[in-house]
Image (cartoon, rainbow, N blue to C red):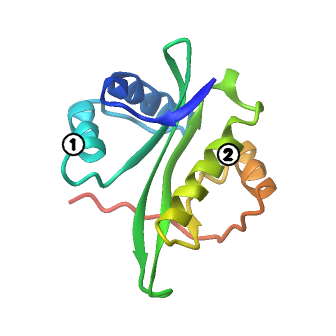
Amino acid sequence: MIIRFAKEGDIKQIVLLCKAHAIYEKTTFDSNKKAMLLLQYLFGSENALKCVVVEQNNELLGYATFMKQFSTWDADFYIYLDCLYLKEETRGKGIGTKIMAMVKEFAISEGCTIIQWQTPDFNTDAINFYKKTGAKSKAKERFFWKV
């Protein structure tokens, strides 16, 4: 398996992974315009989003997306890990640890000392994995306000 930054040609498979991720997290997913928007934010002039993919035999088996954000409380930038998803057959093989190491390297290259993320409270496998990395959790409610 190869872990690398996404290329434009990966978009269709990334959208399929996003859909699988949404199903895994027991939520809905509308793939309408997702490919176009992901192309824009990953590879357009804004380049606001970074994406790492796991590839084997030209098939993507997982992905992680992350971006640089600002914390008012810390008065500093941090990296926000938006998504980390691996297909079931890929889990438990050290791939998640390697992805987290890549995100950490990116954070360091950007001068960030903190990486933040969240996962549903029912995703105990992910919670246990994150705790093994040495990460600490903070209980909060996440709100969505559609505008």
Foreground disc of the pair 1, 2: 1
Amino acid, disc 1: Gln
Q: Which sits in the foreground, 54 or 80? A: 54
Amino acid, disc 2: Asn
Q: Quadrant of the N terminus?
A: top right
**x and y percent of residue 119 in the render?**
59, 53
Q: Which sits in the foreground, 89 or 112? A: 112
The residue that label 1 is drawn on is 40
User: How busy is the neighbourhood of tag 1: few (under 14 within 10 Å), some, or many (20 plus)?
Assistant: some
**x and y percent of residue 22 in the render?**
47, 36
Residue visible at 67% across and 41% down in the picture: 96
Residue visible at 26% across and 31% down in the picture: 35
**x and y percent of residue 51 in the render?**
43, 42
**x and y percent of residue 123 in the render?**
67, 45
Give left or right: position of 100 versus 38: right
Give left or right: position of 65 versus 47: right
Q: Quadrant of residue 32?
A: top left
- Disc number at residue 123? 2
**How many numbered discs?**
2
